[in-house]
Image: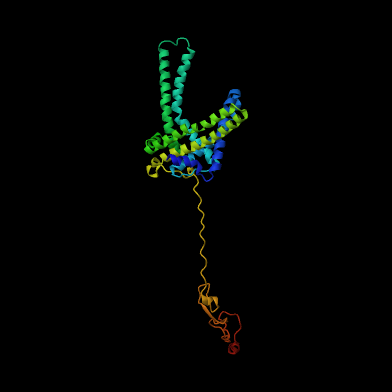
C-alpha cells in the first residue's frame, strides 16, 4: 500500500498540471492565512469581511483531497484531476464542517482549561482555598482531555472523511456508529499509520535543501535567496503530494469497511472521472453484389419483389411486348352518360 500511495500523485492523467495547481492552491492558502491573521490584528472589520475569500482556496484543496480518498476507496491508483470546481467547493465545505463537528469536544477541553487558567492568573478576591483547588483540577482535566481527544481526533477524522467520500452524505460522516465501525477495521489502521508516517517523516526530506541554503548564505546572500526560494517551492509541492498520498492511503485502508454489502456505497459524484473509452470499431461494409447482378443479367429488387432477368439489357419482365387491350370500358350504373330513348314510353304518354 505504501508504494502505491507514493505513486498516486504521479499517475494522474495530467500529473504535472495536477501537482502544479495543487501546489499553487496550497501555497496561496498559507500566504492568505498569514495575511488574514495580520489583517485581523490591524483591521478586524476588514479581516472579518474577507474571511470567505481567504478560506475559499482551502475549501478547494479539501474538496480535492476528498476525491483522492474516493479514488483510494474505489481502488484506483490514478489521482483525479482538478475538474468541476463547484463540486470541489461544496465537498470542501462539507469536509470542513465534519472536521469542526468532531473538534467540538476538544474545544470544550480548551475552554475548561483556559477558563480555569485565566481565573488562576487574574486571582479575583476570594479566590482561595477550594476554588484554587478546583481550578487546578479543571486545568488538569482539560489538559489531559485535550491530549487524549487530540489522538482520538487524529484517528477518527480520516475515517469520517472516508465515509463522506463514499456516501456524499454529511449525516453519514458525523454518525459515530459508522465512523467507529470503519475505524475498527485492521486495513484502516494500516492505511492510517502509512498516512501519519508520510505526513510526519516526509517533510524532513527538505532538510538537506535547508542546510545547503544556510551554508550558501555564508558565502553569498544571493545564493541563499535562490536556495531559500527553491526550498520553499520544493516544500510546497512535496507537502501537497504527501497529502495526496496520505488521503489515498486512508481511503484504500477504509475500502474493506465501505463495501456496498455493508450498507455504505460509493457515491458517483465523489469518484474521479473514469477514463473515456473511444470506440474505434470499423462499421461493417455492405456485402458485395452477386456476379450476375454485376454483369447486368439480374437485377435484385430493392423492395423485396421478384428478381427480373435481363438478356443483353432487354427488359424481360412479365407483360413486356404484349399488345394493349382495345376492349371499350363499360360505363357503370352510376355514370351520368345518357342511355337509349324509349319510343314506346313516349307514345303512351
In this view, the residue in front, 40 or 15, is 15
Residue 168 visible here: no
Q: Residue at x 43, y 30 (%)?
A: 153
Q: Quadrant of residue 126?
A: top left
Q: How many marks?
A: 0
Residue 147 point in image, percent of width and height: 42, 25
Q: Residue furthest front?
A: 219
Q: Quadrant of the N terminus?
A: top left
Whether residue 282 sits left or right of residue 155 in the image: it is: right
| Res 29 → quadrant | top right
Residue 94 against residue 12 in the figure, above or below: above
Residue 154 in picture, x, y percent from top left: 43, 31
Q: Pinpoint residue 161: horizontal percent, then vertical percent.
A: 45, 36
Q: Nearer the viewer, residue 273 or 76?
A: 76
Residue 208 pos. (x, y %)? 52, 31
Residue 146 higher or lower than 268, as above or below: above
- The residue under the point 57% across, 26% down is 37
Which quadrant of the rendered structure holds the C terminus? Answer: bottom right
Q: Is residue 343 visible?
A: yes
Q: How is the image coloured?
A: rainbow
Question: For this rendering, which residue is in front, 134 or 148?
Answer: 148
Amino acid at each position: 500500500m505504501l508504494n502505491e500511495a507514493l505513486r498516486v500523485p504521479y499517475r494522474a492523467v495530467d500529473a504535472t498540471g495536477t501537482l502544479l495547481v495543487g501546489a499553487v492552491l496550497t501555497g496561496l492558502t498559507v500566504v492568505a492565512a498569514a495575511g488574514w491573521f495580520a489583517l485581523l490584528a490591524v483591521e478586524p472589520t476588514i479581516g472579518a469581511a474577507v474571511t470567505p475569500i481567504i478560506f475559499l482556496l482551502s475549501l478547494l484543496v479539501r474538496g480535492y483531497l476528498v476525491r483522492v480518498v474516493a479514488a483510494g476507496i474505489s481502488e484506483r491508483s490514478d489521482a483525479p484531476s482538478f475538474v468541476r470546481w463547484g463540486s470541489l467547493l461544496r465537498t470542501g465545505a462539507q469536509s470542513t464542517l465534519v472536521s469542526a463537528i468532531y473538534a467540538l469536544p476538544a474545544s470544550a477541553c480548551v475552554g475548561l482549561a483556559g477558563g480555569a487558567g485565566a481565573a488562576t492568573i487574574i486571582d479575583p478576591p476570594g479566590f482561595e482555598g477550594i476554588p484554587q483547588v478546583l481550578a487546578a483540577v479543571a486545568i488538569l482535566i482539560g489538559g489531559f482531555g485535550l491530549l487524549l481527544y487530540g489522538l482520538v481526533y487524529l484517528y477518527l477524522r480520516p475515517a469520517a472523511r472516508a465515509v463522506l467520500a463514499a456516501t456524499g452524505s454529511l449525516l453519514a460522516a458525523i454518525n459515530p456508529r459508522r465512523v467507529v465501525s470503519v475505524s475498527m477495521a485492521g486495513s484502516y489502521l494500516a492505511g492510517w499509520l502509512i498516512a501519519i508516517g508520510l505526513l510526519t517523516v516526509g517533510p524532513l526530506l527538505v532538510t538537506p535543501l535547508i542546510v545547503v541554503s544556510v551554508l550558501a548564505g555564508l558565502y553569498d546572500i544571493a545564493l541563499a535567496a535562490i536556495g531559500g526560494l527553491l526550498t520553499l517551492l520544493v516544500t510546497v509541492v512535496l507537502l501537497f503530494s504527501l497529502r495526496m498520498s496520505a488521503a489515498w492511503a486512508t481511503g484504500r485502508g477504509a475500502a474493506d469497511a465501505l463495501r456496498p454489502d455493508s450498507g455504505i456505497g460509493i457515491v458517483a459524484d465523489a469518484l474521479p472521472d473514469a477514463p473515456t473509452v473511444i470506440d474505434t470499431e470499423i462499421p461493417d461494409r455492405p456485402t458485395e453484389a452477386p456476379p450476375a447482378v454485376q454483369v447486368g443479367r439480374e437485377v435484385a429488387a430493392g423492395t423485396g419483389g421478384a428478381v427480373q432477368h435481363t438478356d443483353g439489357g432487354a427488359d424481360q419482365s412479365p407483360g413486356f411486348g404484349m399488345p394493349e387491350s382495345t376492349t371499350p370500358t363499360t360505363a357503370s350504373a352510376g355514370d351520368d352518360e345518357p342511355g337509349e330513348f324509349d319510343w314506346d314510353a313516349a307514345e303512351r304518354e
